[in-house]
Amino acid sequence: MERNISAQSPYKALFRLGQRVAERSNRSRSIRDDSMRLNVTLWLIIINVIVYVFELIFGNAFLTLFSLIPNLALKGFYWQFITYMFLHSPGDPMHIFLNMFALLMFGPRVELAMGPKKFLIFYLICGVGSGLLFLPLSGDMNTPMLGASGAIFGVLTAFGLMFPTATVFVMGFFPMPAIFAVVVFGILEIFYGVTGLEPGIANFGHLGGMITAIILLKFFGFKKERIRYFWE
């Protein structure tokens, strides 16, 4: 019996070692799988950059065909409700830079919480909702709308509602809880949209993305965390 026990002990040690190696391998594989699945945000950024290059190459004809022009969209150019959110002002590189930077800041965490497929659906529907609200409030059926801002405002709203106590640096300098930042942005978009103090900016489109995000979060069944105040 003693011989059998001593003979089995090396095998037991090897078996335990094999278990540890397998567990580590599974953990690393799980991490790799998660990182591979979390690629919607990255692909959205890549697609926006590629489309921006197309804009520079093909010019106004490309913009007319794919930006959201209410008069055309309602006459059969229905694809513009999707394509406009991948276009940005070719004469203002900061337009695409700021939008993609915001998407990079808030997109990955929301994507992780929702899952890639649901996040992609959420992003696209927020963009469509932004365009739909822009139509009746724009006042000019020939004014084109372009940019990912509506969809990204939807992502920002989701971030604020799902992670209300996370710190957001508004304008890059002013820290505040994410839920407060969403409220501030919402008030500002209403104010600028009504007063027209930001000409050339589709403020009601931004607001449309935020409203759509709130509706979708309710539809998807996500529950926001309880807000913890600073004195707690």
Image (cartoon, rainbow, N blue to C red):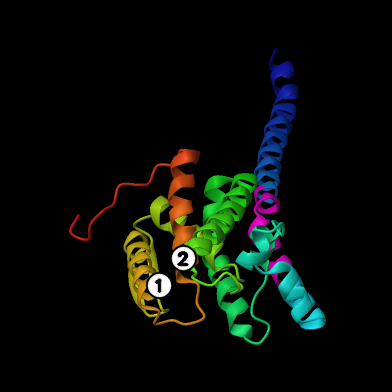
Q: Position of residue 138 (x, y in %)?
A: 50, 69
Locate residue 97, reporting x and y percent.
60, 78
Q: Is residue 110 above or below residue 52?
A: above
Res. 231 image quadrant: bottom left
Q: Quadrant of the N terminus?
A: top right
Q: Nearer the viewer, residue 178 or 47?
A: 47
Depth order, front residue of 46/232: 46
37 inside magenta stretch: yes
**Image height check: is 117 above or below 97?**
above
Residue at image coords 54%, 68%: 149
Question: Which residue, given by chain and number where applicable, does mark 1 sit on?
Answer: 193
Q: Residue at x 68, y 49 (%)?
A: 37
**Residue in the picture at 65% in, 48% down:** 34
Is 16 contained in the magenta span? no
Of the 4 image quadrants, the one containing the C terminus is bottom left
Going by the numbered disc 1, the residue's amino acid type is: Gly
Name the main secondary structure of what is drawn in magenta. Answer: helix
**Between marks 1 and 2 in the image, the one whose residue lies nearer the viewer:** 2
Q: Quadrant of residue 43?
A: bottom right
- The answer to whether the residue labelled 1 contacts the one labelled 2, judged by CB atoms less than 8 Å apart, is yes
Magenta extent = 34-49
Which one is nearer the viewer's eye here, 209 or 33?
A: 209
As drawn, 12 above or below 143: above
Mark 1: which secondary structure? helix
Q: Separation of disc 1 and disc 2 at Cα?
A: 9 Å
Of mark 1 and mark 2, the one earlier in the sequence is 2
Residue position marked by numbered label 2 in the rendering? 137
